[in-house]
Image (cartoon, helix red, strand yellow):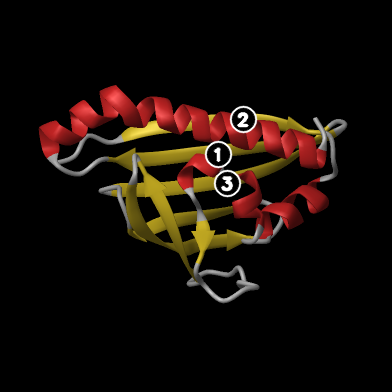
Amino acid sequence: MARERLLESVQFVGRPLPEVFAFFSDAGNLERITPAFLHFRILSPMPVEMRPGALIEYRIRLFGIPFRWETLIEQWEAGVRFVDTQRRGPYALWHHTHEFRAVPGGTLVVDRVRYALPMGLLGEIGHALFVRRSLGRIFGHRRRVIGEILGI
């Protein structure tokens, strides 16, 4: 059984919740907030109607290896949260909860990702050497770009 891990990221955005949620509801913005080193491209026809059951297919490159990644929108609670899970891709588990909370002066954006790597011991070594740091870079990049686009 693959070891499950948790990645959490919290960011304050100085914009009203409806505006912030609308930004995250547009799948096209994923390309804007994903670092260039992933060579991320959405393959699904755009725009994607975000709702429970929506499938989104991407192409990414991790450590020089191309992957197709398909996510399913499992839960959709407009203005509050949504959950996407990997149906096909590089992880043994990828369960990403996006939560949005109105707070004084703006919106709190909370990302909670439960993930696990395939390949047993090799996956554990890969996590220690590359994946943990790479995920930190990806979510750090997201925070910076979201701050630039929506304001901090």
Q: Earlier in the sequence, mark 2 or mark 1?
A: 2
Name the residue tied to disc 2.
10
What kind of residue is marked 3?
Answer: His
Q: Does the rendering let one see residue 108?
A: no
Secondary structure type for disc 1: strand
From this view, report whether residue 124 is shown above or below residue 87: above
Residue for badge 3: 98
Tell which residue pokes out farthest to the front in this image: 64
Residue 87: where, in percent of width, then height? 34, 62
CB under 8 Å between discs 3 and 1: yes
- The reply to whether the C-beta atoms of the residues labelled 2 and 1 are less than 8 Å apart is yes
Three-letter residue code for mark 2: Val
Q: Which quadrant holds residue 46?
A: bottom right
Q: Residue at x 27, y 23 (%)?
A: 128
- Give left or right: position of 60 versus 102: left
Spatial CA distance of label 2 from label 1 is 6 Å
Q: Find numbered disc 3 in the image and state the secondary structure of the residue it sits on.
A: strand
The residue under label 1 is which amino acid type?
Asp
